[in-house]
Amino acid sequence: MYQKENTSIYKYLLRQVYKVYISLILLLNYFLRKKSKKKTSIFFGGAYSGNKGGTLVKVKRLKNVYTEDKFNFNVLYLLSNSIYYFYFFLKLFKNKIPIIHNQNGVFYPAWYNGNYKIMNKLMSDQLKLADYVFYQSKFCKYSSDKFLHKRKNKFEILYNACDLNIFRPRLNKKINKKKIKILMTGSYRSYLYPGLLAAIKSVCELKNGNNVELSIAGTIEISLKKRILKIIKKNNLEKNIFFLGSYNQTLAPKIYRSHDIYYFFVHNAPCPNALIEAIASGLPVVYLNSGSCKEIVEKGGIAIKSKTSWQKYHSINHKSISSAFKRIISNYSYYHKEARKSAIKKHDFKNWIYRHDVIFKKYKLELFSTINK
């Protein structure tokens, strides 16, 4: 999920310098690359990799499998939310090497307070130029068709994935009803306040009949945290709600396995890795029926009604959350099994890599045959 922009002049200038650097790499490869290289060698267009979630993790997982070669690549793998080059230089490679585009979310007024049309234009240009597109969910395809460009062929829906041997259910799959532990994870910005507020209100209501704890893991804006802490104090929830702080992919599996239920209340989420990691860990989910969530969770949780809106985010009914929580607790084994089943069905990392392999080889072969006719 993108965050609202509040870019300083310093950060803007750094981005422009980086854009020039990546564009120069493309230009050098256009003139100097060796065309006979057979092994798949990828350039990710300057996209960053890391260990703390989202696009960073996705790129890192790809780099663990495929060699990135900035100066002699034969596949351009580009991400919709990591455009760090001038379009002119990208166009040079059309019909020279395969251009694969990974489409995530789009820009829209409800959360982006800049010129969302200009930002979408950058993604749209790349999307149109690509030889093949991976849409991260059906919702990603829907939103892309609406805001970017309606692509009619050479694409597929390929959900984000994780290693199911690492993100797996705990050995003791039963729930301890004497203390039920709820988990929320993510990178929290001010626009995610409605989801946090609804979750806290739910805990406030549930604690009267249950011993419940809510853990909030991940980074959170200082101003948002202060706002949330005031609500926690006002409702005497200091012993029920905890901030776990930032975490990485090494700690993530342990965090998921130490909890019982997962809350996810993000509007228009394209295909969140955190949600996939949660169901892979066997956590039943109470989630907002918005974005791709229903596609991902399927029968592994209960959805809270939500209106799809691009102009503003609607408030979330905390009573519906509490009701869903109780339904899951009353039939925990079923939702636990279904959550894991959903992850196995569509989010296995092995299949994710297999589909990349198939497309890389297919378009390398097709382009080679066309050039040598």
Image (tube, rainbow, N blue to C red):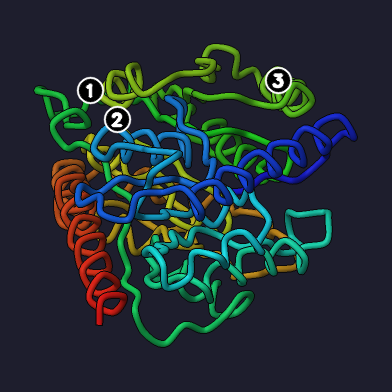
Asked if marks 2 and 1 touch (Cβ < 8 Å), the reply is: yes
The residue indicated by pointer 1 is 176
Distance in Å between CA atoms under marks 3 and 2: 23 Å
Which residue type does callout 1 highlight? Asn
367 displayed left or right of 204: left
Residue 326 against residue 361 in the figure, above or below: above
Figure quadrant of residue 329: top left
Residue 269 is tagged as: none
Q: Earlier in the sequence, mark 3 or mark 1?
A: 1
The residue indicated by pointer 2 is 260
CA neighbours of label 2 inside 10 A, class few (<14), some (14 to 19), many (20+): many
Figure quadrant of residue 144: bottom right
Distance in Å between CA atoms under marks 3 and 1: 27 Å
Residue 94: x and y in percent read: 48, 70
Residue furthest bottom as drawn? 152
Asked if marks 3 and 1 touch (Cβ < 8 Å), the reply is: no
Residue furthest left as drawn? 171
Figure quadrant of residue 72: top left
Residue 55: x and y in percent read: 47, 41
Residue 109 against residue 286 in the figure, above or below: below
Residue 147 against residue 251 in the figure, above or below: below
The residue indicated by pointer 3 is 229
Residue at image x 83%, y 61%?
Answer: 115
Which residue type does callout 2 highlight? Asp
Closer to the camera: disc 3 or disc 1?
3
